[in-house]
């Protein structure tokens, strides 16, 4: 699978930007988050419509549990949604490319 194929099977950057902006608008500092929240985006790389996300530390019960590859970032009021979306997609792309490489061996 080529890099373009991998990218075409991941969530769109626009969808992630919208997601991040939505989460960003709900974060209020408290004793637990300090104004920052973790986000995990997950995909199997099979379809741009099959992915999940979760916030916080709920890795064994969240929406990402059934996906193989997870990208992790943090959101606060200074986070650039565009930059974080790119970072999350880069993480997923790297994991999927590694899977392809291992299958060729």
Image (cartoon, helix red, strand yellow):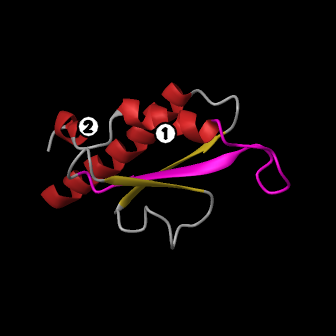
Residue at 34% x, 53% y: name it.
51
Secondary structure beneath dot 2 equals: helix
Of 24 and 7, nearer the camera is 24
Camera sees residue 105: no
- Is-magenta flag for residue 30? yes
Q: Secondary structure at mark 1?
A: helix
Q: Position of residue 13 (x, y in %)?
A: 38, 32
Q: How packed is label 1: few (under 14 Cα within 10 Å), some, or many (20 or more)? A: some
Identify the image quadrant of the N terminus: top left
Front position in the image: 30 or 84? 30
* SS assignment for the magenta stretch, majority: loop
Magenta segment? 25-45
Residue 22 falls left or right of residue 27? left
Q: Would you name the residue on which mark 2 appears?
A: 7
Q: Which residue is mark 1?
A: 19
Q: Residue at x 39, y 39 (%)?
A: 89
**Left or right position of 50 against 105:** right
Q: Position of residue 63 (x, y in %)?
A: 44, 62
Q: CA distance from mark 1 to mark 2?
A: 18 Å
Residue 86 sits in quarter? top left
Residue occupying image coordinates x 25% and y 44%: 48
Query: Looking at the figure, which quarter contains the C terminus?
Result: bottom left
């Amino acid at each position: 699978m080529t890099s373009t194929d991998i990218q075409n099977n991941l969530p769109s950057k626009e969808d992630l930007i919208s997601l991040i902006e939505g989460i960003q608008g709900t974060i209020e500092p408290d004793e637990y988050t300090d104004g920052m929240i973790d986000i995990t985006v997950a995909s199997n790389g099979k379809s741009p419509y099959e992915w999940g996300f979760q916030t916080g530390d709920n890795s064994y019960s969240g929406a990402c549990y059934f996906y193989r590859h997870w990208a992790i970032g943090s959101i606060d009021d200074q986070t650039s949604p565009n930059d974080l979306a790119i970072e999350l997609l880069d993480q997923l792309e790297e994991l999927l490319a590694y899977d392809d490489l291992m299958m060729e061996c």
